[in-house]
Image: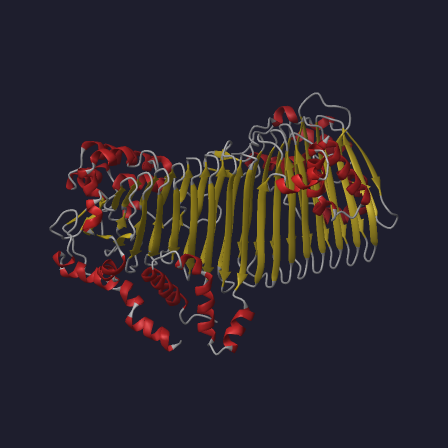
Amino acid sequence: MSSEQDHLKETDTEARFEFKKEQKAAFAAEKGLTEETIRVISEDKDEPEWMLERRLRALKQFQKMPMPTDWPGQPDLSEVDVDQIVPYIRPDVEVRGGVDDWRDLPDDIKDTFDKLGIPEAEKNALSGVGAQYESEVVYQNMQERWEEKGVVFMNMDQAVQEHEDIVKEYFMTKCVPPSDNKFAALHGAIWSGGSFVYVPEDTTVDMPVQAYFRMNSEGMGQFEHTLIVAEKGSEVHYIEGCSAPKYSAFNLHSGGVEVFVGEDAHVQYSTVQNWSKNTYNLNTKRAIVEKGGRMEWISGSMGSKATMLYPASILKGRGASDNHITIAFAGEGQNIDTGAKVYHNAPETKSTIESKSISKDGGRTNYRGLVHIANGAKNSSTSVECDALMFDNESTSDTMPYMEINESTVDVAHEATVGKIGDEDVFYLQSRGLDDDDAKQMIVSGFIEPITEELPIEYAVELNRLVELEMEGSLG
Amino acid sequence: MSAQLPANLSEETVREISDARDEPEWLLEARLEALAALDELDLPDVIQTPGRRWTNLEALDFESLVDPLNQSDETVREAPDDVVVLPFTEALDEHGDLIEERFGSVIDLEENYLTALSAALFTTGTFVYVPEGVDAQDVKVRAEMNSRSLFSHTLVVTEESSSVTILESIASGEDADEDRYFSNLVEIAAGENSYVQYGSLQNLDEETYTYTLKRGDADTYATINWIEGNLGSRLTRSDIETELNGDASETKIVGAFFGHEDQHFDVNARVWHQAENTTADLVTRGVLDDEARSVYEGVQDVGRDAWSTNSYQRENTLMLSDESEADASPKLIIHNHDTEASHAATVGQVDKEDLFYMVSRSIPELQARNMLVEGFFVPVLDEIEVDEFRDDLEELIAARLQ
């Protein structure tokens, strides 16, 4: 191991994610999922009647739907017993809806986010920050100049109260209905926290807003909901970071993300996910893109025991476009099943999907993607590129793309490659004086560059560090 | 969900088929076992995505399609002297032991409902045996289907260091005025260092539903090359598969289809790399006109112990009509890192610039388009070693373009 890595390990990244805090809570729901639990959560949040009704409808949906078990090569979800998790924990914070000054937080929570480097990042690179601890957002702040322009960035629970009409119209109605899949239904029943972002017409939020999700307690589930409405001609970049310390019992994260990209609007949604390796990460993320709008999904999946995540874009208006960049890194015991879904429902729509995966030490990655071009989506084009890098023959790398083309005036291309790390490349770098580990790390960093260059520099560095940490010491 | 056992099918039916052909006891047993398994078996897997089932096999009404006791075909077989090419039934007399050993050894006859149905009821098919060291060219098996349903089973066995090129073609005899069903299973057991090219051309009338499963087992240094041309039939479900079980074995799976009107092609190419230094190349080219629809699944599966694997897959679909639909899913399943694998798939139209260039050289537009379509199939035609097969395929493509 090189000295650079020793340095990393001792001072930085590992310590930043692996620490645990004593589990303190003002209110924790009973384990398991019943109508009673949901009523209690809804009451604790003082929600309007319609939201409680939606939750209860979603619960019925959840109980009706079978677990997904028949997808070829899917992660094993048999351990995921919803009755074993604590669905809702309200941390011991006085201010409902989050404080707007880090100093007002209890020391242990403040310390958590300090270690994760969130306040530091806020100062340097962000327009606004939300931080969720267990089930509730504990900190929320945005620069005043955006507030003045009518930009809204607040926690989702608060938005239910303060922007009831918008939330009522968009919340799990048009984009991700609870009936979409079993975990979307679960999410609809017990969602808590998350962000609400509203960007008015022709407003460009030039620095990203970020939400950070932290699970601290053992055996809990986190179900935050993110709703982004970007009006005509607006632009916003939303970053989401996630982490949790590792426990022996499983944790469940089942977020829901709905994005409405208005005419000629541009939304970028970036995720750097570093859940602990006992977490099941089963999310539903979807965007509806109007005429001339552009949606970008950037995802780095490093953590979790099993991930099933396929961000989707529905290109609804003429000339709408989509760009997916995903990186998956599966080490020992991890199964990262991720990909993209794009529906071309209008003429002249365009999508590009770039997927990179790395598997080592028995890890398993799978690209699973669907591109659908509807009849009438004339002159649409799509290009899908998947590259996989494998370190050993204990690992598995699958690629399962699905293409459905119902229109002839289209340009559809899919390409995928799988290979081992090139001996010649390693040899070349060694001949320039790098040792074996450093050479391989450098190749991997180059391999994932397409995603790191899409992120603000702080996050790119972060992602690189995570990858380096994953690679550390175990290269043969 | 398993399909219903057709009411006109019983143990008696199967015994009658077997008795009429004076078959050995072991084959009757195998047929009866397949029949008994039908109750438990499902139709072959079909890809399903949210809101879309790529091929609907459930809609097939086997009760009316299957007429087991009135199967009729006319098959002409041509072969050089030093190779055995016999109707399956006749071959049982002289090569019974070998057939008993290999029948159902490459394809699990109880793999799905349709393979079991085929094994229980087949009345035609061919046995090809190439002795050690023999090089045989241009084995031709031309079959005509003359009944409501026809079930065929072909077995090819090649001994060490032999080689053979085979053309199998199937077409309809007299015009059918009813829905028909054709089922064809082909097994190839390729011995050490042997070479097989198996070409098949399907041009059944468009009232016929076709199911074919062709699978090869390649021993050390063996090569199995498949070439399939699909032009006929209303609905075709075709699976071509090679298991590379021997070190340094190779396979090519080359397919061409050309659909028009309301034809539906569900073509699949799969390869399993199970040994070291194996190579696979999958090439499929398809053209769709009118309301034709295609479904393609390609699978490259590289096993844990398949060190030093090379595996390539390409699928290209050309759409000539706005009403046509193409679904494709090229899959890579890789368990060994010492692999070089890639796949690529495209769907598009005839290239506008190419067309413009030809029109600017005074070639009428329709003719120019037809030339480009013919050219699109060249990578497939180039692979064909039996000249007659190439000529036939070219002719059928040209005829469809008129």
Q: Residue at x 13, y 52 (%)?
A: A93
The one of A267 and A271 positioned closer to us in this rendering: A267
In the displayed structure, A49 sits above or below A297; it is above
Percent coordinates x, y for residue B100 in the rendering: 73, 46
Instruction: Determine the residue located farthest toward the right in the rendered image.
Output: B81
Q: Which residue is at the front of the view, A320 or B71?
A: A320
Q: Quadrant of the N terminus of chain A?
A: bottom left
> Residue B45 appears at what percent x and percent y?
55, 40
Q: Is residue B41 visible?
A: no
Q: Is residue B305 above or below residue A7?
A: above
Q: Position of residue B223 (x, y in %)?
A: 71, 55
* Residue at point 62%, 60% (across, down): B275
Q: State how the image is colored.
A: secondary structure
Is A349 situated above or below A93? above
Please state if A355 lies on the left or on the right of B89 as rendered: left
Residue B351 relative to residue A218: left or right: right
> Measured from the top left, where is residue B273 in percent x and y?
61, 56
Question: Along the line of sight, which residue is nearer the eye, A237 or A395?
Answer: A237
Q: Nearer the viewer, residue A44 or B261?
A: B261
